[in-house]
């Protein structure tokens, strides 16, 4: 099996090299670009098919190795450490942003409202 895969790899590399030389020799003609695009699409589909085949073959060969999703957090949290769980905002979480409340007393005079009326000056 390994020998067949090595031969297949060599053939695919040779085809890629030939198409590259063909594209450079023709100065990037439409035919050369089209052939390279088709070859690239073939390689892309072949890679996806090989990945899926290997995954399915591995599951069939060793079904005990199939693991479910790991939902454990091992004591870690995204928003902080475990000690501040009770202090997080229930809706938004505490991501380290501090919001200071503005004072309600009018220690500063508010700016006057803008008027849309033209001045008489």
Image: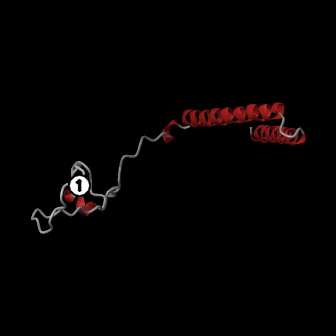
Question: Residue at the left extreme?
Answer: 105
Residue at the image point whose x is 66% and y is 37% from the top: 47
Image vertical order of residue 17 relative to residue 82, above or below: above
Location of residue 111 (image quadrant) = bottom left
Image position, residue 6 (x, y; %): 78, 42
Residue at the image point whose x is 24% and y is 63% from the top: 83
Q: Nearer the viewer, residue 100 or 109?
A: 109
Asked whether, in this view, residue 84 is left or right of residue 54, the answer is left
Residue at the image point whose x is 66% and y is 32% from the top: 45
Residue at the image point whose x is 41% and y is 42% from the top: 69
Q: Nearer the viewer, residue 116 or 30?
A: 116
**Residue on which the image places disc 1:** 119
Asked whether, in this view, residue 109 is left or right of residue 12, the answer is left
Asked whether, in this view, residue 90 is left or right of residue 77, the answer is left
Image vertical order of residue 49 relative to residue 14, above or below: above
Image position, residue 43 (x, y; %): 71, 35
Image position, residue 24 (x, y; %): 86, 42
Give the quadrant of the N terminus: top right
Q: Nearer the viewer, residue 59 or 121?
A: 121
Location of residue 79 (image quadrant) = bottom left
State the colouring used for the structure image. Answer: secondary structure
Q: Secondary structure at mark 1?
A: loop
Label 1 Cα neighbours within 10 Å, binned few <14 / some 14-19 / many ≥20 = few
Asked whether, in this view, residue 98 is left or right of residue 60, the answer is left
Give the quadrant of the C terminus: bottom left
Location of residue 104 (image quadrant) = bottom left
């Amino acid at each position: 099996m390994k020998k067949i895969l090595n031969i297949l790899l060599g053939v695919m590399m040779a085809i890629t090299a030939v198409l590259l030389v063909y594209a450079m020799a023709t100065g990037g003609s439409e035919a050369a670009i089209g052939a390279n695009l088709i070859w690239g699409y073939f390689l892309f589909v072949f890679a996806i098919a090989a990945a899926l085949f290997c995954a399915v073959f591995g599951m069939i060969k060793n079904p005990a190795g199939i693991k479910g999703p790991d939902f454990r957090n091992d004591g870690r949290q995204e928003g902080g450490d475990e000690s501040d769980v009770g202090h997080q905002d229930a809706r938004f979480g505490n991501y380290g942003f501090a919001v200071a409340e503005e004072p309600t007393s009018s220690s500063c005079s508010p700016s006057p409202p803008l008027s849309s009326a033209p001045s008489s000056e």
